[in-house]
Amino acid sequence: MRGVVLLLTVLLLASPSALSQTAGDKLVVPGTRIGNWTVDLAIADLVHRNGPATSIAGSKEWTPNGDLRPREPIFYRWEPLYFAAATEDKQRVEFLTVFSEFGRTSPPDYRTDKGIGFRAAQAEVTKTYGNPTAQPIPGPEWTTLIYNEIGLGFRFQGTQMRNIFVFRPGSGGTIWRL
């Protein structure tokens, strides 16, 4: 019996899900998570894990082209982690995002489960994921690609990817102006 318990413990520790969520995890799983942060966590859970947010702002201060729905989400940003979460009620996460800001040294090394990261061009994203479900209102320099059915989005400033978004599959229309 002790051997069976030991074997089960070893198998559990070696399972892909356990290995894929390490402390330095940079994997983006559409509709589910960015690294160790999942869309099912509450804002309080993120604060507990990451410490106080570096900044908290409404979407008017944070979105470049007003492509979000008019409900004015609140963004909790942890700038040293290149991570933010949006909420409407300061409790439930609406979406997660990792970002690369202009002028920063190098973009964070987050990648989707299909290998798309911040160095990918827009053409590479559409080659990998197909045509987006929607492209919200583009700004003069901004393009957003939303893959609503899988809960994944990308925002580009010119040719440079600036955001990777993860949200609950099918909820893109409640977040962006699609």
Image: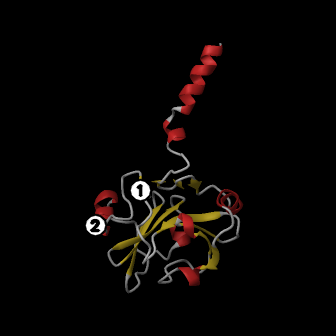
Which of the two residues, 85 or 21, is positioned nearer the viewer here? 21
Using the rendered view, name the quadrant where residue 53 is placed: bottom right
Q: Name which residue lies at 58% across and 55% down.
A: 37
Image quarter (top left, top right, bottom left or bottom right) of the N terminus: top right
Pick out the residue farthest to the bottom: 140
Q: CA distance from mark 1 to mark 2?
A: 16 Å
Q: Residues within 10 Å of mark 1 (few under 14, many from 20)?
A: many
Tell me which label, 1 or 2, sits earlier in the chain: 1
Q: Amino acid at mark 1?
A: Arg
The location of residue 104, given as percent across then percent down, is 44, 73
Q: Name which residue lies at 52% across and 53% down.
A: 35
The location of residue 105, given as percent across then percent down, is 42, 71
Q: Amino acid at mark 2?
A: Ala
Nearest to viewer (mark 1 / mark 2)? 1
Which of the two residues, 53 or 135, is positioned nearer the viewer here? 53
**Left or right of 116: which side holds 169?**
right
Question: Considering only vertical position in the picture, is 68 above or below 169?
Answer: below
Task: Identify the secondary structure beneath mark 2.
Answer: helix
Q: Name which residue lies at 55% across and 63% down.
A: 81
Q: How many marks?
A: 2
The location of residue 57, given as percent across then percent down, is 63, 79
Task: Identify the secondary structure beneath mark 1.
Answer: strand
Pointer 1: what residue? 111
**Left or right of 116: which side holds 61?**
right
The location of residue 55, given as percent across then percent down, is 63, 75
Colouring scheme applied when the structure was drawn: secondary structure
Which of the two residues, 110 or 126, is positioned nearer the viewer here? 110
Q: Name which residue lies at 31% across and 57% down.
A: 128
Residue 123 disc label? 2
